[in-house]
Image (spheres, rainbow, N blue to C red):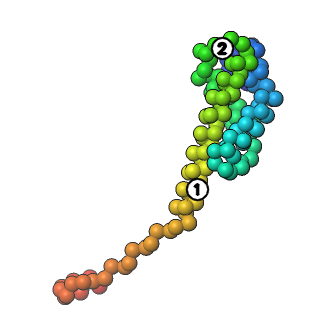
Amino acid sequence: MEYWEQINRKKPNEVIKLFLSQENICNLHDAIIDRVIRETGVRIFRQEDEDLIHFMYESLENYDMYVLPNALDMVRFLNVKTIQHCVYRIKNEMLMQQQYVKDASTLPIPLQRPIVTTTDHSLALFK
């Protein structure tokens, strides 16, 4: 949260305090893991806190113009947006990794060496 204060040069309000709290970060990690399991059937490890916090800051920037009736509603809204974004990125990275493994496991078939097909003996000098 100190970083948020440095880059924004203002004190955090109640929404920011709740959204960037360690408890909320843990809840987001668990929700992301659960959602990835539901959507892909693959269990992932907990992501780095710094990566998640980066996406949380991004959500704060993207949706700072939204104002909901109370702080908890706003935090829920920001959590939903953060989870959607993180799960989308994780699923895309999983697909890219699967494609990489597939591409790396099937090497291209080398072309056959060229052979001379002409009977012109004037080219014999170049052999």
Judge from the rendering whether residue 87 lies leftward or rightward of residue 43; answer left or right: left
Disc 1 residue type (three-letter): Gln
Q: In which quarter of the image is the N terminus?
A: top right
- Which label number is shown at residue 119? none
- Residue linked to disc 1: 98
Task: Report whether residue 119 is seen.
Answer: yes
Secondary structure beneath label 2 = loop
User: Callout 1: 10 Å neighbours few (<14), some, many (20+)?
Assistant: few
- Residue linked to disc 2: 68
Which percent across, then down, holds residue 110?
43, 73
Disc 2 residue type (three-letter): Leu
Residue drawn at x 68%, y 11% is 69
Secondary structure beneath label 1 = helix
Which percent across, then down, holds residue 8?
67, 17
Residue drawn at x 33%, y 79% is 114
- The picture quadrant where one finds residue 122 is bottom left
